[in-house]
Image (spheres, helix red, strand yellow):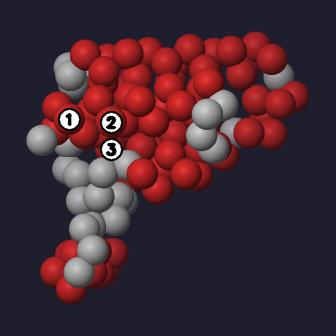
Amino acid sequence: MSLENRRLCARLIYDVLSGKRITREALLRFPKGEHDKSVLAAYHALIYYEADDDLRERDAEYREEQDLYLKSIADILLSGKPLPVNIIKNYEEYYGGSVLPEKKGFKGWLKSLFRFIT
């Protein structure tokens, strides 16, 4: 399942970089309840991408670097390989686990609630 989810995430990132999809829509399409650290890191990298929209608009060099960084993440995920440990650790430090919503239904809601509380 993780291999398919990695490839899905890669395609979503490519869609954002090419302008086919807005970042928020791509984030909403990430697999729910995923615990693969590579997918989680890609999710958080995309969150940062959206948060830095103003900076990317003002600074062409920063925009180019950030685009290359996201493209490299997507390239790795498309191959099915895990992201390098240093990339995963960069995002684990701030988020310490999944913030992706769980699957729909009562069980998913309950898991999300407990994760939020702890």
Q: Quadrant of the N terminus?
A: top left
Mark number displayed over residue 8: 2
Q: Nearer the viewer, residue 87 or 23?
A: 23
Which residue is drawn at the image coordinates 21% and 86% (left, top)?
A: 106
Q: CA distance from mark 3 to mark 2?
A: 13 Å
- Mark 1 Cα-neighbour bin, 10 Å: few <14, some 14–19, many ≥20: few
Examine the rendered structure and indicate whether residue 69 appears above or below residue 107. above
Label 2 SS: helix
Label 1 SS: helix
Q: Nearer the viewer, residue 51 or 105?
A: 105
Which residue is drawn at the image coordinates 38% and 16% (left, top)?
A: 75
Task: Return the residue at label 3.
Answer: 40
Count of marks placed on residues? 3
Q: CA distance from mark 1 to mark 3?
A: 14 Å
Q: Given contact means CB atoms under 8 Å apart, are the residues at marks 1 and 3 in contact?
A: no
Examine the rendered structure and indicate whether residue 88 appears above or below residue 113. above
Examine the rendered structure and indicate whether residue 76 appears above or below residue 6. above
The x, y position of residue 112, in whole percent, is: 28, 74
Q: Given contact means CB atoms under 8 Å apart, are the residues at marks 2 and 1 in contact?
A: yes
Label 1 sits on what residue type? Glu
The x, y position of residue 60, in whole percent, is: 80, 17
> In this rendering, which labeled residue sits more in front, label 3 or label 2?
2
Task: Return the residue at label 1.
Answer: 4
Quadrant of the image occupied by residue 66? top right
The x, y position of residue 105, in whole percent, is: 23, 81
Which residue is drawn at the image coordinates 20% and 35% (left, top)?
A: 4
Quadrant of the image occupied by residue 84? top left
